[in-house]
Image: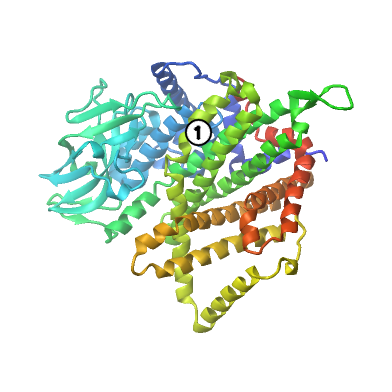
Amino acid sequence: MQVDLGALTAVLDGRWAELRGQLRHRMSATKPAHSTGLDTETHRSQVFDQLRELVDSGHPRLGFDPEYGGLGDIGGSVVSFEMLGYGDLSLMVKAGVQWGLFGGAVQMLGTERHHEKYLRDIMSLDLPGCFAMTETGHGSDVQHLRTTATYTDGSFVINTPDDDARKDYIGNAARDGRAAVVFAQLITGGRQYGVHAFMVPIRDESGRPMPGVRIEDCGRKAGLNGVDNGRLWFTDVTVPRAALLNRYGDVAEDGTYTSPIESDSRRFFTMLGTLVRGRVSVAGSAGSATQRALTLAVRRAETRRQFQHPSGGTEVVLLDYLAHQRKLLPALATTYALHFAQEELVEMLHEVQTTAQPDERAQRLLESRAAGIKAVATWHATASIQTAREACGGFGYLAESLLPDLKADTDVFTTFEGDNTVLLQLVAKGLLTDYRDNFADLSPLATARLVAEQLLDTVWERLPARKIVSPEPRDRKWHLDLFEDREQHVLAGLARRLRAAASDPFGTFNSAQDHVLRAGRAHIDRLVLNAFVAAIEGCTDVAAAELLNRVCDLYVLANVEADRAWFLEHGRLTPAMAKKVVAEVNALCRELRPHARPLVDAFAIPEQYLSG
């Protein structure tokens, strides 16, 4: 089967194909600035120079409002960050801090006065800035961070009460940032109104810290050393009342607090929800790094030979060994699946954030999906880059292979922009809320039917294995039904466990965390499969669609194989069917082996980013 590479690339490029093409052309015309062996200061300086080159390209303007010189393409801005993931990831992170987090916070949390005053300078890099949210003592639990902003005599006074409340790991803080969006507990009239964001100068024009601001360099890290992460302390730092980014809450001259959202907690989560773009960008960049690693590993596996074939002649190419195919091809199939899920996620983000009054449910779904895709995509990146490194043997440990830097730079992706374990719990909590609401809306008859179905499910699990009908392993309907059934079963079981939480909600939830995480993961796996199927249905090239169908089969069956203990325990597979799934994964690896190179070449990564 001959497949047109262009047709595969077109499916992968999706809605923003034209932009991806422009970015590839620019990348192909630019010599990559390699960072291996650079000292920290040289690397940081190189990355800052590259930021200025990005300004000249115009791409940082993509995500901002045309009224202030932007291009109004929020989805395109995320795609541009995603494409930076093919190169030095320090540049991607640094750009993400400047235009995604810092600029995005001003755009999404500020109002016209902030947009008019700051956005042009942020886009042009005349105002380099930071996103100062995380504290040493509060990373995931942002709602309870302890930096304070107290309104007094027409100004806010920012304070760091102790070292536990210092802002930590802040990108752009150690060297280049001149301002920071600082998240702090707003206090006025003796009452605390929860976390709000403030625009705070941290350096003057000459680069010296502003009065009351203390800055410390985090120093050398395991990776991403082109990013100047630092720590910030504030001692009676006074900023004007207008420094409050006041989209969701404001303070009048007399100290009166007002907000369109009455609940402090709801206001906080609404505010955080608008900042989801950074999480989506990290997921996409992780995908790009994974594509790059697997491209490097597949190319080497097609040329590297080991051990002579018993029939004599030349040695065997590594990728002809089933064990090597199993290392790389299921990972490649999952990478394709996650790419299509990411494309859907970016479209969701674009629609929600370009709508004047976004639907509250659409916003909630976006936040949940972004949390789950980010978690699964970054865990997949960590595992796949390690697999690629091992697949390349000793060469994969050399800097020239590019894999050690990829491994080091992506490792932190699993914990920044949200710790993955916490993110999957957020996904599950959203599912439980929907489950509860749906159950509450049921009529007595429908409730009785649901209880009957759950009893039937219990009976099903106890059926002798011989009574389960054996499906065709490559039947797409069976795949979709299987993933949906797993999600619904896990969620229903979790809901039943948590109903006993009245006397000790925390203890019950804590004892069920394994179940919570499984529910979140099962949900995301189902969404990823649905996205893959939708992408295939949208493919008009027959040969490309046929190949993608096989890749999707491998994604599904490798997932089922990895989780076959659950499917066996819950009566969804017989032992014979489980063995058949393993055999089918082997068969698909053999079938896809001739297409391994075209599948990675379809990512269309510019050649100079594939050589050390």
* Quadrant of residue 224 within the rendered picture: top left
- Residue 381 at x, y percent in the picture: 56, 38
Quarter of the picture holding the N terminus: top right
The chosen color scheme is: rainbow
Please report the residue visible at 47 percent of the width from the left and 51 percent of the height from the top: 424
> Which type of secondary structure does the marked residue at label 1 adopt?
helix
Q: Residue furthest bottom?
A: 445
Please report the residue visible at 78 percent of the width from the left and 32 percent of the height from the top: 320
Q: Visible in this render: residue 354?
A: no
**Nearest the camera: 475 or 421?**
421
Quarter of the picture holding the C terminus: top right
**Nearest the camera: 599 or 243?**
599
Q: Which residue is mark 1?
A: 410
* Quadrant of residue 387 within the rendered picture: top right
Residue 328 relative to residue 217: left or right: right
* Label 1 crowd (10 A; few <14 / some 14-19 / many >=20): many
- Residue 370 at x, y percent in the picture: 48, 49
- Residue 538 at x, y percent in the picture: 69, 51
- Residue 502 at x, y percent in the picture: 35, 69
